[in-house]
Image (spheres, coloured by chain):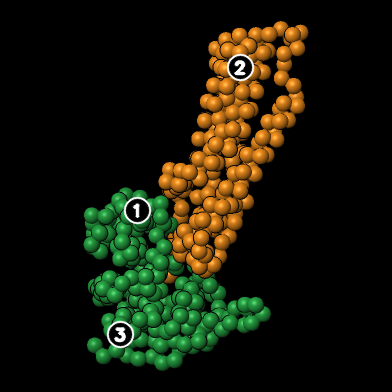
Chain colours: A orange, B green
Amino acid sequence: MGEKRITFRLSDAFRLGYDNVRRRFNRAFLNVAAIALGIAFFSTLSLTDAILRFNSPKESGLVIEGYQYGLVLVSFVVCAVSITNSMLIAVYERCREIGTMKCLGALDQHVLKLFLAESIILALLGGVLGFGTGFLALVLVCIFMGFRALSIPPSTLLLLLGKVTLLSLALSMLATIYPAYKAAKLDPVEALRYEV
Amino acid sequence: MRSDVIIETRDLARYYVLGGEVIKAVDGVSLKVYRGEYLSIVGPSGAGKTTLFNLIGGLDRPTRGKVIIDEVDISELDAYELAWLRCRKIGYIFQTFNLIPTLTALENVALPTIFAGVPRDEGMRKAEMLLKSVGLGDRLNHKPSELSAGQQQRVAIARAIVNDPDIILADEPTGNLDFQTGREIIKLLKELNRKRGVTVIAATHDLKMIEVSDRVVFMRDGRIERIERMGV
Protein backbone atom coordinates (compact mmCIF):
# COMPACT_ATOMS: atom_id res chain seq x y z
CA MET A 1 0.00 0.00 0.00
CA GLY A 2 2.91 2.34 -0.57
CA GLU A 3 4.67 4.38 2.12
CA LYS A 4 2.84 4.05 5.43
CA ARG A 5 3.76 7.20 7.31
CA ILE A 6 1.59 8.32 10.22
CA THR A 7 2.89 11.10 12.41
CA PHE A 8 1.84 13.49 15.11
CA ARG A 9 4.50 16.13 15.58
CA LEU A 10 5.14 17.45 19.07
CA SER A 11 4.51 20.99 17.77
CA ASP A 12 1.07 19.88 16.50
CA ALA A 13 0.29 18.21 19.84
CA PHE A 14 1.10 21.45 21.68
CA ARG A 15 -0.78 23.62 19.19
CA LEU A 16 -3.92 21.43 19.41
CA GLY A 17 -3.47 21.21 23.18
CA TYR A 18 -3.17 24.97 23.47
CA ASP A 19 -6.29 25.47 21.30
CA ASN A 20 -8.16 23.09 23.52
CA VAL A 21 -7.06 24.80 26.73
CA ARG A 22 -8.01 28.20 25.28
CA ARG A 23 -11.37 27.17 23.87
CA ARG A 24 -12.41 25.01 26.81
CA PHE A 25 -11.20 27.58 29.25
CA ASN A 26 -13.63 26.79 32.09
CA ARG A 27 -12.47 23.20 32.45
CA ALA A 28 -8.83 24.16 31.95
CA PHE A 29 -9.19 26.89 34.56
CA LEU A 30 -10.27 24.34 37.19
CA ASN A 31 -7.09 22.36 36.60
CA VAL A 32 -4.89 25.47 36.51
CA ALA A 33 -6.48 26.68 39.76
CA ALA A 34 -5.89 23.30 41.43
CA ILE A 35 -2.21 23.36 40.47
CA ALA A 36 -1.89 27.06 41.33
CA LEU A 37 -3.33 26.60 44.82
CA GLY A 38 -0.94 23.79 45.73
CA ILE A 39 2.02 25.65 44.26
CA ALA A 40 1.01 28.93 45.94
CA PHE A 41 0.89 27.17 49.31
CA PHE A 42 4.34 25.66 48.72
CA SER A 43 5.80 28.95 47.38
CA THR A 44 4.53 31.02 50.28
CA LEU A 45 5.87 28.54 52.78
CA SER A 46 9.28 28.27 51.10
CA LEU A 47 9.61 32.04 50.71
CA THR A 48 8.51 32.70 54.28
CA ASP A 49 11.08 30.16 55.41
CA ALA A 50 13.76 31.98 53.39
CA ILE A 51 12.79 35.36 54.81
CA LEU A 52 12.70 34.10 58.37
CA ARG A 53 16.15 32.59 57.95
CA PHE A 54 17.40 35.84 56.44
CA ASN A 55 15.75 38.35 58.77
CA SER A 56 15.26 36.66 62.05
CA PRO A 57 17.88 35.21 64.38
CA LYS A 58 17.48 31.47 64.84
CA GLU A 59 16.93 31.76 68.54
CA SER A 60 13.69 33.65 67.97
CA GLY A 61 12.19 30.26 67.16
CA LEU A 62 10.44 31.67 64.07
CA VAL A 63 11.12 28.83 61.65
CA ILE A 64 8.83 26.79 59.46
CA GLU A 65 8.19 23.43 61.03
CA GLY A 66 8.48 20.16 59.10
CA TYR A 67 4.78 19.33 59.56
CA GLN A 68 3.91 22.44 57.57
CA TYR A 69 5.67 20.91 54.57
CA GLY A 70 3.64 17.79 55.33
CA LEU A 71 0.54 19.91 54.86
CA VAL A 72 1.91 21.04 51.49
CA LEU A 73 2.27 17.40 50.51
CA VAL A 74 -1.36 16.77 51.48
CA SER A 75 -2.41 19.76 49.39
CA PHE A 76 -0.50 18.30 46.41
CA VAL A 77 -2.35 15.01 46.77
CA VAL A 78 -5.68 16.87 46.87
CA CYS A 79 -4.65 18.84 43.74
CA ALA A 80 -3.63 15.69 41.89
CA VAL A 81 -6.91 13.92 42.72
CA SER A 82 -8.87 16.96 41.58
CA ILE A 83 -6.94 17.14 38.28
CA THR A 84 -7.36 13.40 37.64
CA ASN A 85 -11.08 13.70 38.29
CA SER A 86 -11.46 16.70 36.02
CA MET A 87 -9.40 15.06 33.26
CA LEU A 88 -11.43 11.84 33.48
CA ILE A 89 -14.61 13.85 32.98
CA ALA A 90 -12.93 15.60 30.05
CA VAL A 91 -12.12 12.22 28.46
CA TYR A 92 -15.79 11.20 28.60
CA GLU A 93 -16.89 14.60 27.30
CA ARG A 94 -14.47 14.28 24.41
CA CYS A 95 -15.21 10.62 23.69
CA ARG A 96 -16.61 11.19 20.19
CA GLU A 97 -13.81 13.61 19.43
CA ILE A 98 -11.22 10.97 20.34
CA GLY A 99 -13.10 8.35 18.30
CA THR A 100 -13.18 10.73 15.32
CA MET A 101 -9.45 11.42 15.60
CA LYS A 102 -8.77 7.70 15.60
CA CYS A 103 -11.00 7.36 12.55
CA LEU A 104 -8.92 10.00 10.80
CA GLY A 105 -5.69 8.15 11.45
CA ALA A 106 -4.63 8.95 15.03
CA LEU A 107 -2.85 6.17 16.89
CA ASP A 108 -3.27 5.48 20.62
CA GLN A 109 0.09 7.13 21.26
CA HIS A 110 -1.07 10.29 19.46
CA VAL A 111 -4.06 10.66 21.76
CA LEU A 112 -1.75 10.10 24.74
CA LYS A 113 0.62 12.75 23.41
CA LEU A 114 -2.21 15.26 22.98
CA PHE A 115 -3.45 14.83 26.56
CA LEU A 116 0.07 15.02 27.99
CA ALA A 117 0.79 18.16 25.95
CA GLU A 118 -2.35 19.73 27.43
CA SER A 119 -1.22 18.67 30.88
CA ILE A 120 2.16 20.39 30.37
CA ILE A 121 0.44 23.61 29.26
CA LEU A 122 -1.83 23.50 32.33
CA ALA A 123 1.17 22.80 34.57
CA LEU A 124 3.11 25.80 33.26
CA LEU A 125 0.11 28.09 33.62
CA GLY A 126 -0.67 26.74 37.10
CA GLY A 127 2.97 26.91 38.16
CA VAL A 128 3.41 30.55 37.16
CA LEU A 129 0.03 31.57 38.57
CA GLY A 130 0.76 29.67 41.80
CA PHE A 131 4.17 31.25 42.19
CA GLY A 132 2.70 34.73 41.61
CA THR A 133 -0.07 34.08 44.13
CA GLY A 134 2.43 32.69 46.59
CA PHE A 135 4.63 35.74 46.21
CA LEU A 136 1.67 38.05 46.81
CA ALA A 137 0.76 36.09 49.91
CA LEU A 138 4.36 36.46 51.02
CA VAL A 139 4.19 40.24 50.63
CA LEU A 140 1.17 40.18 52.96
CA VAL A 141 3.11 38.03 55.44
CA CYS A 142 6.02 40.49 55.25
CA ILE A 143 3.78 43.48 55.87
CA PHE A 144 2.23 41.64 58.80
CA MET A 145 5.61 40.65 60.28
CA GLY A 146 7.43 43.84 59.38
CA PHE A 147 9.98 42.24 57.01
CA ARG A 148 11.01 43.50 53.60
CA ALA A 149 10.11 40.96 50.90
CA LEU A 150 12.90 42.24 48.69
CA SER A 151 15.42 41.07 51.19
CA ILE A 152 15.27 37.61 49.60
CA PRO A 153 18.25 37.16 47.27
CA PRO A 154 17.14 36.94 43.59
CA SER A 155 19.02 33.65 43.27
CA THR A 156 16.74 32.14 45.95
CA LEU A 157 13.68 33.42 44.07
CA LEU A 158 14.89 32.01 40.77
CA LEU A 159 15.75 28.69 42.33
CA LEU A 160 12.29 28.48 43.84
CA LEU A 161 10.66 29.40 40.51
CA GLY A 162 12.58 26.55 38.86
CA LYS A 163 11.57 24.20 41.66
CA VAL A 164 7.85 25.06 41.45
CA THR A 165 7.87 24.73 37.66
CA LEU A 166 9.27 21.21 37.93
CA LEU A 167 6.89 20.42 40.77
CA SER A 168 3.82 21.59 38.87
CA LEU A 169 4.93 19.64 35.78
CA ALA A 170 5.37 16.48 37.84
CA LEU A 171 2.06 17.03 39.63
CA SER A 172 0.07 17.68 36.46
CA MET A 173 1.62 14.87 34.44
CA LEU A 174 1.26 12.33 37.22
CA ALA A 175 -2.39 13.29 37.61
CA THR A 176 -3.01 13.10 33.85
CA ILE A 177 -1.31 9.80 33.03
CA TYR A 178 -4.31 7.64 33.94
CA PRO A 179 -6.99 9.73 32.14
CA ALA A 180 -4.67 10.11 29.11
CA TYR A 181 -4.11 6.36 29.02
CA LYS A 182 -7.88 5.77 29.19
CA ALA A 183 -8.40 8.22 26.33
CA ALA A 184 -5.71 6.56 24.24
CA LYS A 185 -7.17 3.11 24.76
CA LEU A 186 -10.75 4.07 23.85
CA ASP A 187 -12.23 1.75 21.26
CA PRO A 188 -13.12 4.04 18.32
CA VAL A 189 -16.35 2.14 17.57
CA GLU A 190 -17.56 2.58 21.14
CA ALA A 191 -16.24 6.14 21.32
CA LEU A 192 -18.14 7.19 18.20
CA ARG A 193 -21.35 5.74 19.59
CA TYR A 194 -20.94 7.54 22.90
CA GLU A 195 -23.44 10.29 23.71
CA VAL A 196 -22.69 12.77 26.49
CA MET B 1 -1.72 -3.60 -12.92
CA ARG B 2 -4.23 -2.55 -10.27
CA SER B 3 -7.28 -4.73 -9.84
CA ASP B 4 -10.71 -3.34 -10.70
CA VAL B 5 -11.95 -4.53 -7.34
CA ILE B 6 -10.95 -2.05 -4.63
CA ILE B 7 -12.81 -3.66 -1.71
CA GLU B 8 -13.85 -7.24 -1.30
CA THR B 9 -15.51 -8.81 1.70
CA ARG B 10 -15.57 -12.60 1.97
CA ASP B 11 -18.16 -14.24 4.21
CA LEU B 12 -17.75 -11.29 6.57
CA ALA B 13 -19.45 -11.61 9.96
CA ARG B 14 -19.48 -9.68 13.21
CA TYR B 15 -21.39 -11.05 16.17
CA TYR B 16 -21.87 -9.36 19.52
CA VAL B 17 -23.01 -10.87 22.77
CA LEU B 18 -25.54 -8.60 24.40
CA GLY B 19 -27.24 -9.66 27.62
CA GLY B 20 -26.34 -13.29 26.95
CA GLU B 21 -27.86 -13.14 23.47
CA VAL B 22 -25.76 -13.33 20.28
CA ILE B 23 -26.50 -10.41 17.96
CA LYS B 24 -25.50 -11.08 14.37
CA ALA B 25 -24.83 -7.48 13.28
CA VAL B 26 -23.18 -8.63 10.04
CA ASP B 27 -23.69 -12.22 9.04
CA GLY B 28 -21.83 -13.59 6.05
CA VAL B 29 -21.53 -10.62 3.71
CA SER B 30 -19.62 -11.28 0.49
CA LEU B 31 -19.35 -8.21 -1.68
CA LYS B 32 -17.08 -6.78 -4.36
CA VAL B 33 -16.81 -3.02 -4.75
CA TYR B 34 -15.29 -1.77 -7.98
CA ARG B 35 -12.85 1.09 -8.30
CA GLY B 36 -14.59 4.39 -9.02
CA GLU B 37 -18.01 2.98 -8.24
CA TYR B 38 -20.79 4.76 -6.33
CA LEU B 39 -22.38 2.10 -4.19
CA SER B 40 -25.33 2.69 -1.93
CA ILE B 41 -26.10 0.36 0.92
CA VAL B 42 -29.75 0.52 1.86
CA GLY B 43 -31.41 -1.04 4.81
CA PRO B 44 -33.45 -0.25 7.87
CA SER B 45 -31.84 0.81 11.11
CA GLY B 46 -30.08 -2.22 12.62
CA ALA B 47 -29.48 -3.88 9.25
CA GLY B 48 -25.72 -3.88 9.90
CA LYS B 49 -24.64 -0.98 7.67
CA THR B 50 -22.55 0.83 10.29
CA THR B 51 -20.95 -2.42 11.49
CA LEU B 52 -20.07 -3.26 7.88
CA PHE B 53 -18.48 0.18 7.50
CA ASN B 54 -16.54 -0.25 10.73
CA LEU B 55 -15.23 -3.59 9.48
CA ILE B 56 -14.25 -2.19 6.08
CA GLY B 57 -12.52 0.75 7.76
CA GLY B 58 -10.59 -1.54 10.09
CA LEU B 59 -12.19 0.05 13.16
CA ASP B 60 -13.66 -3.29 14.19
CA ARG B 61 -12.39 -6.86 13.85
CA PRO B 62 -14.63 -9.47 12.20
CA THR B 63 -15.85 -12.57 14.01
CA ARG B 64 -15.43 -14.42 10.72
CA GLY B 65 -14.40 -13.68 7.17
CA LYS B 66 -12.09 -11.18 5.51
CA VAL B 67 -11.94 -7.61 4.25
CA ILE B 68 -9.57 -7.16 1.34
CA ILE B 69 -8.66 -3.64 0.26
CA ASP B 70 -6.50 -3.25 -2.81
CA GLU B 71 -5.61 -6.94 -2.61
CA VAL B 72 -4.46 -6.67 1.02
CA ASP B 73 -6.24 -8.61 3.75
CA ILE B 74 -6.61 -5.92 6.40
CA SER B 75 -6.69 -8.47 9.24
CA GLU B 76 -2.96 -8.87 8.59
CA LEU B 77 -2.26 -5.18 9.16
CA ASP B 78 -0.88 -3.92 12.47
CA ALA B 79 -2.24 -0.87 14.34
CA TYR B 80 0.15 1.45 12.50
CA GLU B 81 -0.88 0.19 9.07
CA LEU B 82 -4.57 0.31 9.97
CA ALA B 83 -4.18 3.93 11.09
CA TRP B 84 -2.47 4.66 7.78
CA LEU B 85 -5.38 3.00 5.95
CA ARG B 86 -7.89 5.22 7.79
CA CYS B 87 -5.79 8.29 7.24
CA ARG B 88 -4.76 7.98 3.60
CA LYS B 89 -6.89 5.35 1.93
CA ILE B 90 -10.33 5.92 3.41
CA GLY B 91 -12.28 9.09 4.10
CA TYR B 92 -15.11 8.91 6.61
CA ILE B 93 -18.34 10.85 6.60
CA PHE B 94 -20.71 10.40 9.52
CA GLN B 95 -24.40 11.05 10.05
CA THR B 96 -23.59 13.30 12.99
CA PHE B 97 -20.72 15.05 11.12
CA ASN B 98 -18.34 14.52 14.07
CA LEU B 99 -16.41 17.73 13.60
CA ILE B 100 -14.09 18.72 16.45
CA PRO B 101 -16.13 21.45 18.21
CA THR B 102 -13.14 23.51 19.35
CA LEU B 103 -11.58 23.74 15.89
CA THR B 104 -12.60 26.04 13.04
CA ALA B 105 -13.84 24.65 9.73
CA LEU B 106 -10.37 25.15 8.25
CA GLU B 107 -8.63 23.42 11.17
CA ASN B 108 -11.13 20.55 11.06
CA VAL B 109 -10.45 19.93 7.39
CA ALA B 110 -6.68 20.18 7.91
CA LEU B 111 -6.69 17.76 10.88
CA PRO B 112 -6.13 14.52 8.88
CA THR B 113 -3.16 16.13 7.11
CA ILE B 114 -1.42 16.38 10.50
CA PHE B 115 -1.51 12.60 10.90
CA ALA B 116 -0.48 12.19 7.27
CA GLY B 117 2.69 14.16 8.01
CA VAL B 118 1.86 16.95 5.56
CA PRO B 119 3.63 20.24 6.44
CA ARG B 120 1.24 22.61 8.25
CA ASP B 121 1.17 25.35 5.61
CA GLU B 122 0.51 22.89 2.85
CA GLY B 123 -2.26 21.19 4.87
CA MET B 124 -3.94 24.51 5.61
CA ARG B 125 -3.67 25.59 1.97
CA LYS B 126 -5.26 22.38 0.78
CA ALA B 127 -7.99 22.60 3.42
CA GLU B 128 -8.80 26.13 2.30
CA MET B 129 -8.93 25.09 -1.32
CA LEU B 130 -11.26 22.20 -0.53
CA LEU B 131 -13.55 24.33 1.64
CA LYS B 132 -13.82 26.80 -1.22
CA SER B 133 -14.61 23.95 -3.61
CA VAL B 134 -17.53 22.82 -1.41
CA GLY B 135 -18.85 26.38 -1.29
CA LEU B 136 -17.61 27.37 2.17
CA GLY B 137 -14.91 29.87 1.21
CA ASP B 138 -16.57 32.45 3.44
CA ARG B 139 -16.84 30.12 6.46
CA LEU B 140 -13.20 29.12 6.92
CA ASN B 141 -12.82 30.43 10.45
CA HIS B 142 -16.26 29.49 11.74
CA LYS B 143 -16.62 26.87 14.45
CA PRO B 144 -18.99 23.94 13.82
CA SER B 145 -21.54 25.47 16.22
CA GLU B 146 -21.65 28.54 13.97
CA LEU B 147 -22.48 26.48 10.87
CA SER B 148 -25.76 24.97 9.68
CA ALA B 149 -26.12 21.19 9.53
CA GLY B 150 -25.62 21.18 5.76
CA GLN B 151 -22.51 23.36 6.06
CA GLN B 152 -21.12 21.07 8.77
CA GLN B 153 -21.57 18.07 6.49
CA ARG B 154 -19.76 19.94 3.70
CA VAL B 155 -16.87 20.55 6.08
CA ALA B 156 -16.91 16.83 6.93
CA ILE B 157 -16.81 15.97 3.22
CA ALA B 158 -13.86 18.31 2.66
CA ARG B 159 -12.15 16.68 5.66
CA ALA B 160 -12.83 13.22 4.23
CA ILE B 161 -11.06 13.98 0.96
CA VAL B 162 -8.18 16.13 2.19
CA ASN B 163 -5.68 13.24 2.08
CA ASP B 164 -6.88 12.17 -1.40
CA PRO B 165 -8.34 8.82 -0.31
CA ASP B 166 -9.38 6.16 -2.84
CA ILE B 167 -12.50 5.32 -0.86
CA ILE B 168 -15.17 7.37 0.91
CA LEU B 169 -17.33 5.63 3.49
CA ALA B 170 -20.39 7.77 4.13
CA ASP B 171 -22.59 6.43 6.92
CA GLU B 172 -26.05 7.96 6.59
CA PRO B 173 -24.58 11.27 5.38
CA THR B 174 -28.04 12.78 4.95
CA GLY B 175 -29.61 11.30 8.07
CA ASN B 176 -29.53 14.57 10.01
CA LEU B 177 -30.37 16.84 7.09
CA ASP B 178 -33.59 18.05 5.52
CA PHE B 179 -34.50 16.65 2.12
CA GLN B 180 -33.15 19.50 0.01
CA THR B 181 -29.84 19.78 1.90
CA GLY B 182 -29.54 15.99 1.77
CA ARG B 183 -29.95 16.07 -2.01
CA GLU B 184 -27.21 18.69 -2.27
CA ILE B 185 -24.84 16.56 -0.16
CA ILE B 186 -25.52 13.49 -2.30
CA LYS B 187 -24.93 15.59 -5.42
CA LEU B 188 -21.62 16.72 -3.97
CA LEU B 189 -20.60 13.13 -3.20
CA LYS B 190 -21.52 12.07 -6.74
CA GLU B 191 -19.50 14.95 -8.13
CA LEU B 192 -16.45 13.82 -6.13
CA ASN B 193 -17.02 10.29 -7.35
CA ARG B 194 -17.19 11.42 -11.00
CA LYS B 195 -14.48 14.10 -11.02
CA ARG B 196 -11.92 12.51 -8.68
CA GLY B 197 -12.69 8.88 -9.43
CA VAL B 198 -13.03 8.19 -5.72
CA THR B 199 -15.04 5.10 -4.81
CA VAL B 200 -18.04 6.10 -2.70
CA ILE B 201 -19.93 3.71 -0.46
CA ALA B 202 -22.90 5.46 1.11
CA ALA B 203 -25.24 3.89 3.62
CA THR B 204 -28.76 5.21 3.72
CA HIS B 205 -32.25 4.20 4.65
CA ASP B 206 -33.70 6.82 2.37
CA LEU B 207 -34.56 5.42 -1.04
CA LYS B 208 -34.70 8.92 -2.50
CA MET B 209 -30.93 9.20 -2.06
CA ILE B 210 -29.95 6.22 -4.21
CA GLU B 211 -30.66 7.45 -7.72
CA VAL B 212 -27.04 8.60 -8.21
CA SER B 213 -25.68 5.10 -7.44
CA ASP B 214 -24.13 2.66 -9.87
CA ARG B 215 -25.33 -0.23 -7.72
CA VAL B 216 -27.51 -0.54 -4.66
CA VAL B 217 -27.00 -3.21 -2.03
CA PHE B 218 -30.08 -3.97 0.06
CA MET B 219 -29.25 -5.25 3.52
CA ARG B 220 -31.45 -6.74 6.19
CA ASP B 221 -30.57 -8.46 9.47
CA GLY B 222 -26.85 -8.37 8.73
CA ARG B 223 -27.16 -10.03 5.33
CA ILE B 224 -27.31 -8.88 1.73
CA GLU B 225 -30.88 -9.27 0.52
CA ARG B 226 -30.20 -8.33 -3.09
CA ILE B 227 -27.99 -6.12 -5.26
CA GLU B 228 -29.49 -3.97 -8.00
CA ARG B 229 -27.70 -2.18 -10.78
CA MET B 230 -29.13 1.27 -11.43
CA GLY B 231 -29.89 2.05 -15.04
CA VAL B 232 -28.03 5.31 -15.74
Residue B141 left/right relative to B53 = left
Do tag 1 and tag 3 residues touch (Cβ < 8 Å)?
Answer: no
Report the Cα–Cα distance between label 1 and label 3: 35 Å
Chain letter, disc 3 residue: B
Query: 10 Å neighbourhood of mark 2: few (<14), some, or many (≥20)?
Result: some
Q: Amino acid at mark 3?
A: Asp
Q: Nearer the viewer, mark 2 or mark 1?
A: 2
Q: Give the total of numbered labels.
A: 3
Whole-angstrom CA distance, mark 2 to mark 1, is: 47 Å
**Coordinates of residue A125 in the picture (x, y in percent):** 50, 35
Q: Share a chain, discs 2 and 1?
A: no
Residue placed under numbered mark 1 in the picture: B143
Identify which residue is drawn at 41% across, 88% down.
Answer: B218
**Horizontal side of residue B65 vs B39, given as left or right:** right
Check chain identity for marks 1 and 3: say if they share one.
yes
Badge 3 crowding class, 10 Å Cα cut-off, few under 14, some 14 to 19, many 20 or more, is some
Q: Earlier in the sequence, mark 1 or mark 3?
A: 1
Q: Amino acid at mark 1?
A: Lys
**Which residue has dot 3 on it?**
B214
In the rendered view, does A140 fall on the left or right side of A25?
Answer: right
Q: Is residue B232 above or below residue B176?
A: below
Residue at x 46% of width, y 76% of height: B50
Residue underneath mark 2: A141
Asked if residue A114 is positioned above or below residue B45 in the image, the reply reads: above
> Depth-wise, is mark 1 or mark 3 nearer the camera?
1
Question: Label 2 amino acid?
Answer: Val
Q: Nearer the viewer, mark 3 or mark 2?
A: 2
Q: Is B210 rendered above or below residue A158? A: below
